[in-house]
Amino acid sequence: MPASASASASDISHRDPAWLKDKADDLMRGGDARSAANAYTAALDIDPTLRAALGNRAAACLRLGLAEAAARDCTTAMMLLPAPRLQPAPPLPPVSLPALALHSDSESESKSGPRKPVEGGPTAPTPELLWEREALERSQRAADCLESLLDGVTEAEGDGDGGYTGGSIGLRRPGSLGPGAVESERLGVMKLLARRGLAHCKCGDFGRAQADFASAAQVAGTCESEDARERNSSLAEDAARMGVLAECAICKGDGDASLRGGSPSEAEASYAAAL
Amino acid sequence: MEPAFVPALVNRSALMGRLMRWSECRDDCTAALRALGVGADDRPLAVQLDDKGSTEGRADFVPGPGSVRLRAWLLGALLRRAQALVKMGELAEGLSDYRRALELDPLNPRV
């Protein structure tokens, strides 16, 4: 084969996200988590909506000790799930257009100059606050997606018109999926939730970990395969363990507070309770 | 509740150090290090942390080898145990822990 032909074939493969993802899977199986994470990143640079690559990169990150990045990848992958069914918007109150036109404060504004921000009024949100809001919205949306996915089975077994709004980024519509495909979607969500639960656990956020494991157990309970049914009980156990660890963390926090407050005996008791 | 809960062990060892209860300080640090996969053998720290056997036996809340939290726990437990050992007159063991801490963080002025 001429050198130029071989080079172009190589270029094509390096631009194919599916090929890169398969390559990353091979690296992961070989135990090279760092190279696998790089290959998943290369695949995601080309196609950021590749959910499987996000989920597998989360696994690689967990192995590398990058738990926060793993949790973020799982959340992003969950955000790529088909959007939940949209509720119809409530009817708008009747608007009287002539009245609206009369009620114009442009004149008074022009006399007094541009409005100044009110003292003590709402200020611009900090980047941290914006991030927190975004994270909250993401997790809420992931939960909604989960619900829509759970509804998907009945839709798929029914007339097939699910009315889902997913698909703007080339995702399949769960309402039009067969039962087998819905089962596979559910297994995917179960894995993502369990992986994010583990990531939160590694970050020391046991409350969130417990919630994720409990959701994963709930999804596993709705699956039909034997494996998933077995995972249901182990995931429920994981959720219970996260609850215990959350209590440990609370006791440890009490100990830290007592230590800072200059009460070593109370701190010792709290640490002993955690252990 | 969880005898191998490393964050509580590491912080209790700090309390024990402050109270100058050095043997209890050493024991808490040893328990924390064992939970993190660091035993009493002389193998380099990186080898011990990457050891598959110890990785699998590690508690589920312990982060992976590249984690900043894991390094902080390891460094805290090693330095505190070294201090306890020196106070107890076990200088050779104390020096060994300081060497391990240096291996973990060679540029740390505290070490």
Image (cartoon, rainbow, N blue to C red):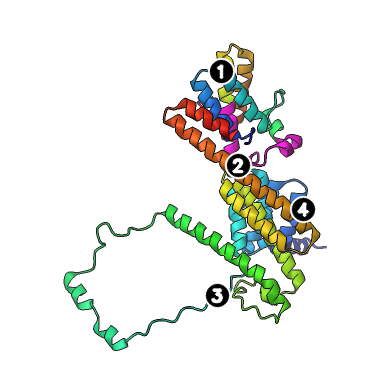
B56 sits left or right of B83 in the view: right
Residue A245, numbered label: 2
Q: State yes or no: discs 2 and 4 in contact (Cβ < 8 Å).
A: no
**What crowding class fits label 4: few (fewer than 14 Cα within 10 Å), some (14-19), or many (20 or more)?**
few
Which residue is painted at 49% across and 22% down in the image?
A: B18
Depth order, front residue of A264/A180:
A264
**What crowding class fits label 1: few (fewer than 14 Cα within 10 Å), some (14-19), or many (20 or more)?**
many
Element type at mark 4: helix
- Residue furthest bottom in the image: A98
Residue hosting label 4:
A26
Q: State yes or no: discs 3 and 4 in contact (Cβ < 8 Å).
A: no
Depth order, front residue of A111/A237:
A237
- Same chain letter for marks 3 and 4: yes
Q: Where residue A202 sits: x, y (%)?
A: 61, 44
Residue B22, numbered label: 1
Residue hosting label 3:
A86
